[in-house]
Amino acid sequence: MPQHRLRAGGVSAVIVLVLASGAACGPAEDAATTSKTASAPARPSAGATAGATAAASNGVEKLRPAEILARARKATAAARYLRMRGQIDDGDGKVAFDFSFAGATEATGWFQQGKQRVEITRIGKDVYIKGNKAFLTDIGGKSAVQLLSGKHLRTTAKSADFKDLAALTDRTSLMKEALKAAGTWKKGAAGTVAGTPALTLTGGPGVAIQVATSGEPYVLRLDGGPGNRIEYLAYGTRVDVRRPPAEAVVDGDGF
């Protein structure tokens, strides 16, 4: 199978590098990808400080940065349901994605780079990929369009051709690599993210992570410079991940 643009350079690697470096300066975030409420940076203010004080604190603000991150990663990994969406600019163009998760091995959502858009569903080891015409043309020309238009290609999370796309359905490994690559973290200001009291940890110029300071210490947002962001939303909101109907599935081995 020919190497396609969505895989070139590694999708997961691009996301990690952008978040870790904070050097890329992408365009303003698209309202369709990031809500106005969530896109506002967490800044200390009289109202925010009062709200954070009124809410029951989970105590993470008293811990060292490494301890805060450890608790945040544990809480986020343990969440049964959550949504992860992001937008970055890797220098060659805008990348956007939006995935909802049910447990550690079930996820569904979409990924887009340029004109290419892919819907991805993962259940256990099985990964189902449904691409638009631009994507199908890039991976296999007219024959791929004829065979796979409106269909889901069944593959696995370890497929050599699609493992970088499948990586977007693994919520824990992406965060692990991003946090590890950013280096030393320091405490920043208190504020709110979409109404939730939060503490900012900074990992370099433009690089920050927002951690909830009330309720579970969930990760709420990862920033890697202007226009580069991953948001963690809808904790606890049920997600129903289903396999595509059999008649709409094409086995990846045969393709």
Image (cartoon, helix red, strand yellow):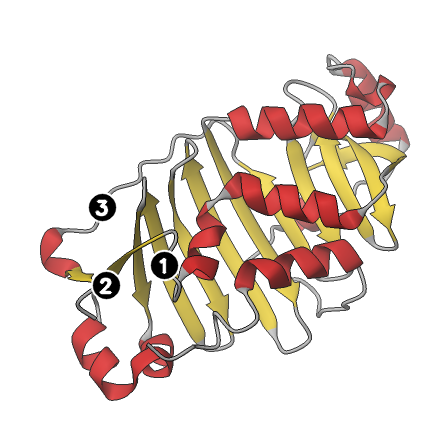
Distance between the alpha carbons at the discs numbered 3 and 2: 15 Å
Looking at the rendered image, the disc whose residue lies closer to the viewer, 3 or 2, is 2
- Indicate left or right for 203 with 137 as reference: right
Q: Position of residue 212 (x, y in %)?
A: 71, 27
Distance between the alpha carbons at the discs numbered 2 and 1: 9 Å
Asked if the residue at tag 1 contacts the one at tag 2, i.e. Cβ–Cβ closer than 8 Å, the answer is: yes
Looking at the rendered image, the disc whose residue lies closer to the viewer, 3 or 1, is 1
Confirm whether residue 49 shows in the render: yes
Q: Amino acid at mark 2?
A: Gly
- Quadrant for residue 61, please give it: top right
> Which residue is identified by label 3?
243
- Looking at the rendered structure, the secondary structure element under dot 1 is loop
> Which residue is identified by label 2?
252
- Looking at the rendered structure, the secondary structure element under dot 3 is loop
The residue that appears at 17% across and 75% down in the rendered structure is 147
Confirm whether residue 32 shows in the render: no
